[in-house]
Image (cartoon, rainbow, N blue to C red):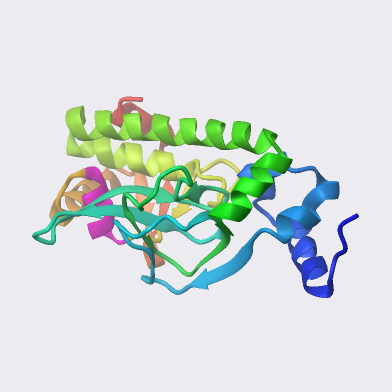
Amino acid sequence: MIKIGRRDAECETGCRSCSVRAASFCSAIPTQDLSILASSRHQVQFGRRETIVREGDPMLSFFNITSGVVKLYRSLPDGRTQIIGFRYPGEFFAISAIHRHTSTAEAVTDVEVCRFPKSRLKRLMNIFPQLQTQLLQMSCRHLAQSEDQIFLLGRKTAREKVASFLLRYSREPSQNQNGNGRYVNLPMTRTEVADFLGLTTETVSRVLANLVRENIISIGLSRSVSLIDIDSLSKISGN
């Protein structure tokens, strides 16, 4: 029988009350075994714009996001960068089977993660084989998103790209949606959106301004965007 100390009991309580557990890989662990999950992780916080891991660093841990938004990007020797993805609460980054990080992870907002050292994650998988199935399913979703992104970058116009991005982000469970995905609060800058979409900041701003003039969206304070006409936005996106 596993004895639970005070700190472990507090961690287990945190796992039970975690708002993203149902959407996370750890949902594969039965509720009665959360003490084992809690003893395998460390809760870590990162401030806005703080680097979490760097491209090329040894892969020592697996990260599961419980709050905030993380961007993943790769760099060239001359300093040019490309954002290759964003990760949201309930999602993970850093695949344990790889020896070095293939991208840099940076906190777009204040971020809290559960960090699992590789040895502890391996132990969890040995105890709960269903974790591997859950991670595979989530990895497949990330792969599908990457395929969508390749198609978007290679074939869509600037207008289609921006519309696709707004729709995709509005569907994130972490968004404080007004019950129907019509409101989003973008934490990333327009430059980051442009980098992700393979556009210039000026182009993103121009497309957004046109969508506002057409009464398809409205833009408020703190990068909040209301999707007024989702049907039109969907048609523009080509989806």
User: Residue at coordinates 44% horizontally, 36% vertically from top-left?
Assistant: 142
Residue 86 appearing in the image: yes
| Picture quadrant of residue 76 | bottom left
* Left or right: 170 in relation to 11: left
The total number of labels drawn is 0
| Picture quadrant of residue 205 | bottom left
* Left or right: 3 in relation to 116: right
From what the image shows, is residue 62 above or below residue 166?
below
Q: Is 128 in front, or is 92?
A: 128
Instruction: List the single residue furthest toward the left.
Output: 78
Q: Is 99 in front, or is 208?
A: 99
Across and down, in percent, residue 104 comes to 32, 58
Residue 176 appearing in the image: no
User: Residue at coordinates 65% horizontally, 38% vertically from top-left?
Assistant: 131
* Left or right: 115 in relation to 237: right
Q: Is 189 in front, or is 103?
A: 103
Across and down, in percent, residue 113 comes to 55, 62
Across and down, in percent, residue 103 comes to 31, 52
Instruction: List the single residue furthest toward the right.
Output: 1
User: Is 196 included in the stretch rendered in magenta?
Assistant: yes
The stretch of residues the image draws in magenta is: 189-197
The N terminus, quarter of image = bottom right
Q: Is 167 in front, or is 55?
A: 55
Magenta: main secondary structure: helix
User: Residue at coordinates 53% horizontally, 71% vertically from top-left?
Assistant: 45
User: Is 223 included in the stretch rendered in magenta?
Assistant: no
The C terminus, quarter of image = top left
Across and down, in percent, residue 88 comes to 49, 51
